[in-house]
Image (spheres, coloured by chain):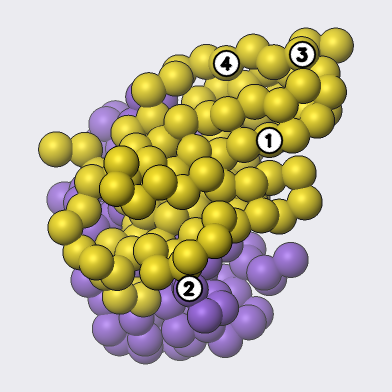
Chain colours: A purple, B yellow
Amino acid sequence: DAGITQSPRHKVTETGTPVTLRCHQTENHRYMYWYRQDPGHGLRLIHYSYGVKDTDKGEVSDGYSVSRSKTEDFLLTLESATSSQTSVYFCAIGTGLQETQYFGPGTRLLVL
Amino acid sequence: AQKITQTQPGMFVQEKEAVTLDCTYDTSDPSYGLFWYKQPSSGEMIFLIYQGSYDQQNATEGRYSLNFQKARKSANLVISASQLGDSAMYFCAMREGNIGNQFYFGTGTSLTVIP
């Protein structure tokens, strides 16, 4: 168990509202990642972090921002949610020599 | 071009038989890592096996083995003695370059084990 939690686990929101998803780890790992999973696309990287206050964009970063003020927390914010951001969001941490990514349980987000 | 290609959207296998799930990758970086994950219907992503680009031998983890053919850029997952609990989505992924680089995932293969 890699000690990763995500909150909330489920969320329904309306178009145009801001949404923040939280990823929390207890393992003190340096690398953390946010993905979204959609049918037919597998998992796609939104943003990742390689340390406190060090973040970078992934392949689908438009409409998302992240922050990491503490090693254990990585926040994903949808500035103004759109229906196209309805998805399952996974957080992951990189561990071990090969930085295998271990995933949190996921957050199901529905934007109406 | 897709970094990871999984061409089998769905596969069926008889219980206790072996099954191979295909994965091809595309990279020009000599250093990379290849990963397989399992996603059961409950939704969690479970790490199965890892192969490094410089590893000389194919990786094995229990009933899982990775058939790594570097020249063909393929990293097929072999599951031996399939069990009903193996029914799930399986994703191939690649970390290109150094540690800390992003992962690229394939679109997955849905495996159904038939009793």
**Label 3 element class:** strand
The residue that disc 1 covers is B79
> Spatial distance from mark 3 to mark 4, Cα to Cα?
10 Å
> Spatial distance from mark 3 to mark 1, Cα to Cα?
12 Å
> Spatial distance from mark 4 to mark 1, Cα to Cα?
12 Å
Give how far across and how far down residue B11 sits, in percent.
57, 16
Q: Tell me if residue B101 comes above or below residue B43 in the rendering.
A: below
**Label 4 element class:** strand
Closer-to-camera residue (A32/A78): A32
Q: Tell me if residue A51 comes above or below residue A102 in the rendering.
A: below
Q: Nearer the viewer, mark 2 or mark 4?
A: 4
- Identify the subunit bearing mark 1: B
> Spatial distance from mark 2 to mark 4, Cα to Cα?
29 Å
Q: Amino acid at mark 2?
A: Glu
Give how far across and how far down residue B106 sits, in percent.
37, 37
Q: Is residue A29 visible?
A: yes
The residue that disc 3 covers is B14
- Residue B112: image quadrant is top right
> Spatial distance from mark 2 to mark 1, Cα to Cα?
23 Å
- Identify the subunit bearing mark 3: B
4 and 1 marks in contact (CB < 8 Å): no
**In this picture, residue A85 sits left or right of residue A6:** left
Numbered label attached to residue B11 = 4
- Residue B9: image quadrant is top left
- Crowding around mark 2 (Cα neighbors within 10 Å: few <14, some 14 to 19, many 20+) is some
Numbered label attached to residue B9 = none
Closer-to-camera residue (A80/B92): B92
Give how far across and how far down residue A24 sits, in percent.
57, 71
**Label 2 element class:** loop
> Spatial distance from mark 3 to mark 2, Cα to Cα?
34 Å
Q: Residue at x 49, y 53 (%)?
A: B35
Q: Amino acid at mark 4?
A: Met
